[in-house]
Amino acid sequence: MSRARSAALWSCLGAGFATLFDATTVAYTVPSLAASLDASTAALQWFLASFSLTFGLGLVPAGRLGDAFGRRRLFVAGLLVFLVGGLLSAGGPEIGAVVAGRFVQGLGAGFVSAQVLGVIQDLYHGAARIRAFVAYTAVGAVAGLTGPLVAGVILTVAPPDAAWRLILLAPLPLTAAAIVLALRGLPRTDVAAPRVTLDLPGIALLGALVVLLMLPVIEPGLHEAAVTAVYAASTLLLVALVVWERAYVRRGRLALFTPVLVRSRGFVAGNLVALLWFGALLAQGSVLTLYLLQTTGAPAIIIAAVFVPGALGRLLVSLVSRRLFARFGIGVLVAGLAVETVLATTLAVSATALATPALLVLVAAANLGLGIAGGLVEPPLRTVTLSHATPALHGVAASFLQLTQRLSATYVVALATGILLGAAGAASAGSLQAALTVCAVAVGVSTLVSLDPSLRRAAAGLRGVADAPVSGGRAGENVGMPETTAEWTLETVAWDDERASALRSAMDAEIGPRYADRFDDLSDDEAARLGAALSIDPATIVATIVATDAGGRPVGHAALRDLGDAFEGSLEVKRVFVEPGARGSGLSRALMAELERVAADSGADRLILQTGDRQPDAIALYEKIGYARIPIYPPYLEISFSHCFEKRVPA
């Protein structure tokens, strides 16, 4: 690992530790905060949920701004906003000001997190990327280990009116240190893009929808007519969001729900797993902490110590999860989720029947298992899900993944807290069981979703590099996860990758002369129209594959293009080319098979392609591998010598 990339990773880990430390301590503030400021259950629900809401909504614009203008300035700005929000919240004279500070702090954390995942994807590839994600998971585990202990000590030694403020202030020195690390470690790659689309209306509509759906949860005493009005308004907002997103895409803008990503079955499945899993386990930890603090009478430091085994288990297992993933693939993810489902169910069924000492032992043992399972789940889930994103959408995809997690946490934490505390603000054994049951069901559903074939296929493609040695290549090389065969390595790269561009130039030099006479007979206007029909907008490219031989020489190229709403469910095969010295080896078939795999993971059910009548070798290949002829389709209608084909993609 180069010194520059190592410094950048440490910057990311420092910022991640500061924001994750906050997340592990905030539940410990609730009892003393409620007593100090006479806060209602609804106010406490907003206090616990507000951070995740603005965290999630800030992620997408932050990711896009980082993609467009460089990550360093967004990274530092986010840390500063997080710092200011923490000061506002800790110094709030009443509960409204405290919640407002948490909203600000969550927005800063969202800006930081989008850049952290974007930096890792930009600077690392293959096995190195998996290792970087493992390190990020390990940092979260260390935060989970130290945060509760620090909060427990503060609650033990500080007066109640001051304790919750000190706990909220605890992450801020870490934040200041992270700012220093970022200024020293992150590369100066800031550039000015001519245009960046943030889709702020889409973000606003989504945020309003989440807030509306939270109202019946936070205000369970709402009149039936008011609840009906809330759900009616939610339906209208959902329709408005769909209409807006479609219109935004038709205008050529990058929508919040980016079509290339949301049409990817694997990306959607991974997000759904993350949504259910993350929200449920965060809520489970919050309600257990609140219940133990409020009802057992045990010292805060003892309650904090109960959660230490879970943090230790997560830390230790996350360090070896890469090797386990390399050996067992998607089975690691599924097994981890299954174990968490069993343990969450055990807590829901058994916790209420035990006296305090036995309950503390059960929670400690269950959290040890949950930590071990979480270490197995998180790095593979993040890596497999984000492997479906093209290089140009690294920041967008990483932000969207965390957006789904954070909006889930916003809703599920509010729901579970409301169930636990009730209108009176007092937890009981029955309310704990109901809250834990909700969490267990969500984790169980996430386990079922993790069995989706698209995740299994993506994991199979990643296993070959999960335990490979780290390459010494430059940042930006090998941006996808290579799939190695006996003769070639198939690599997902950016459209403008130098090797891909060189192979396309070689293809043009070989194929262009075959059709030169036909273009000679055309008028300038006709030639311009045909040239436009054959041109490719890089923004429409879903994937670009480059094949290299055993010596690392680029020998093959293929790509997939999204032709827009008129061809929904279909992707177009483009620029399939094999260098003459590699022909006859089966590489063309391997490239086409890889395109089918990528298309299936993207949620497409059909591949289409166009070629010319003077490429009989290509026509023969397509017919041999199951492509059927179809009529000429746009934009090739004026190219009468086109031959067009389609093939259904198996699910």
Image: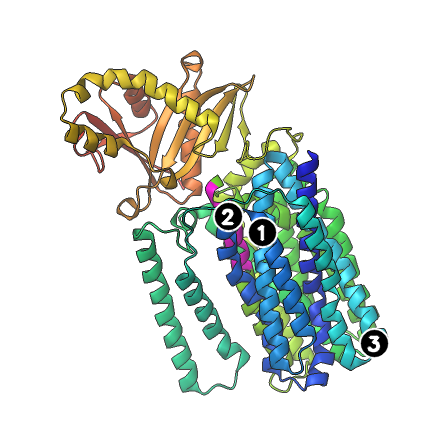
Looking at the picture, which amino acid does disc 1 mark? Arg
Lateral position of residue 27 relative to residue 648, left or right: right
Could you tell me how far apart the alpha carbons at marks 2 and 1 are, in whole angstroms?
8 Å
Q: Residue at x 81, y 71 (%)?
A: 154
Looking at the picture, which amino acid does disc 2 mark? Phe
37 lies above or below 261: below
Q: Position of residue 287 (x, y in %)?
A: 67, 72
Magenta stretch secondary structure, dominant: helix
Task: Name the residue furthest top.
Answer: 581
The residue that label 1 is drawn on is 73
Q: Which-is-in-front pick, marks 1 and 3?
A: 1
Q: Residue at x 45, y 30 (%)?
A: 545
Q: Position of residue 630 (x, y in %)?
A: 22, 33
The residue that label 3 is drawn on is 158
Depth order, front residue of 357/498: 498
Depth order, front residue of 82/329: 82
Start-end of magenta stretch: 392-405
Whether pointer 3 and pointer 2 mark residues with C-beta atoms closer than 8 Å, the reply is no
